């Protein structure tokens, strides 16, 4: 039996990166796509609980079923696993995102929220992102790396228990990408600011802006790898516990 691969994203069902990802995934198995109907970037791990969700069928073809829902990327994973996949998926893929999800961006990313949700459900999951926000970005340089990572994961029987992958691909021609580096997240921050503006009716509103700051990222980090022409692969998991601090905190509060 072919593997069953579930695909989602946060850029919406019409995004070019999603189409690239489902084309590659179909080389390895049957594909179900469930993606947000509209752009849901920055939704992180949000779910819809205050209203019902609606699903629209987009396409049916041999080995490919495409749906969209009017919810978030995490909604898409939950819905698809329970109702729209003919069996439990062997692998969940998210992306290919238009823009970086390296470092601190994993906290805000709807792309990676879907990956973490799949991992929490016990399903192997990989998020792919290209460092290019253009809706018409060229995803061709991504394809060999996406193909290699999906294929290797399936051939090896999956990922280590509880681990998912955050894969970022530099904005470079294929022949300038140096290879793959397994990394940790760089310590970086968004220096956010809200720009105050006025609408045509004279009412004030605020627009979020910001600057990504990562000074001197270490060579083992994802930001360094991307800056130096490598695809970064970061293993992540949904357990946020900081285990090295457990003993110290236990002593602090129970001494």
Image (cartoon, rainbow, N blue to C red):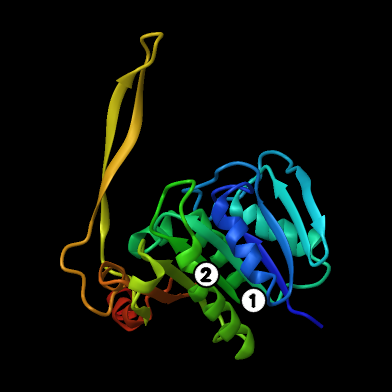
Identify which residue is drawn at 66% across, 60% down.
77
* Residue under numbered circle 2: 143
Q: Position of residue 10 (x, y in %)?
A: 55, 51
Total number of numbered discs in the rendering: 2
Q: Secondary structure at mark 1?
A: loop
Name above or below for residue 154 compared with residue 63. Answer: below
Does residue 132 appear anywhere in the picture? yes
Q: Secondary structure at mark 2?
A: helix
Q: Nearer the viewer, mark 1 or mark 2?
A: 2
Q: Earlier in the sequence, mark 1 or mark 2?
A: 1
Does the residue at mark 1 contact the one at mark 2 (Cβ under 8 Å)? no
* Picture quadrant of residue 105: bottom left
Q: Position of residue 87 (x, y in %)?
A: 81, 72
Does residue 121 appear anywhere in the picture? no
Q: Position of residue 88 (x, y in %)?
A: 76, 73
Name above or below for residue 175 compared with residue 9. Answer: below
* Residue under numbered circle 1: 122
Q: Is residue 21 left or right of residue 106?
A: right
Q: Position of residue 109 (x, y in %)?
A: 46, 55
- Image quadrant for the C terminus? bottom left
């Amino acid at each position: 039996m072919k593997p069953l691969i579930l695909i989602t994203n946060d850029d919406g069902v019409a995004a070019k990166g999603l189409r690239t990802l489902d084309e590659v995934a179909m080389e390895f198995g049957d594909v179900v796509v469930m993606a947000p109907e509209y752009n849901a970037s920055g939704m992180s791990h949000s779910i819809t609980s205050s209203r019902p969700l609606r699903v629209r069928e987009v396409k049916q073809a041999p080995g490919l079923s495409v749906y969209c829902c009017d919810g978030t990327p995490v909604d898409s994973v939950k819905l698809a696993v329970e109702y729209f996949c003919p069996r439990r998926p062997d692998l969940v893929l998210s992306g290919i995102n238009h823009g970086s999800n390296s470092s601190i961006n994993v906290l805000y990313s709807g792309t990676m929220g879907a990956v973490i949700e799949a991992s929490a459900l016990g399903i192997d999951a990989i998020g792919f992102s290209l460092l290019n926000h253009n809706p018409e970005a060229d995803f061709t340089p991504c394809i060999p790396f996406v193909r290699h990572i999906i294929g290797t994961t399936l051939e090896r029987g999956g990922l280590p228990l509880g681990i998912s992958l955050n894969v970022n691909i530099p904005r470079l021609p294929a022949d300038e990408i140096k290879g793959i580096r397994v990394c940790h997240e760089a310590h970086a921050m968004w220096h956010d600011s809200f720009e105050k503006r006025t609408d045509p009716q004279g009412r004030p509103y605020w627009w979020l802006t910001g600057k990504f700051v990562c000074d001197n990222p270490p060579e083992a980090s994802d930001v360094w790898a991307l800056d130096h022409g490598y695809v970064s692969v970061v293993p992540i998991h949904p357990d946020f516990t900081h285990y090295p601090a457990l003993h110290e905190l236990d002593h602090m509060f129970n001494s």
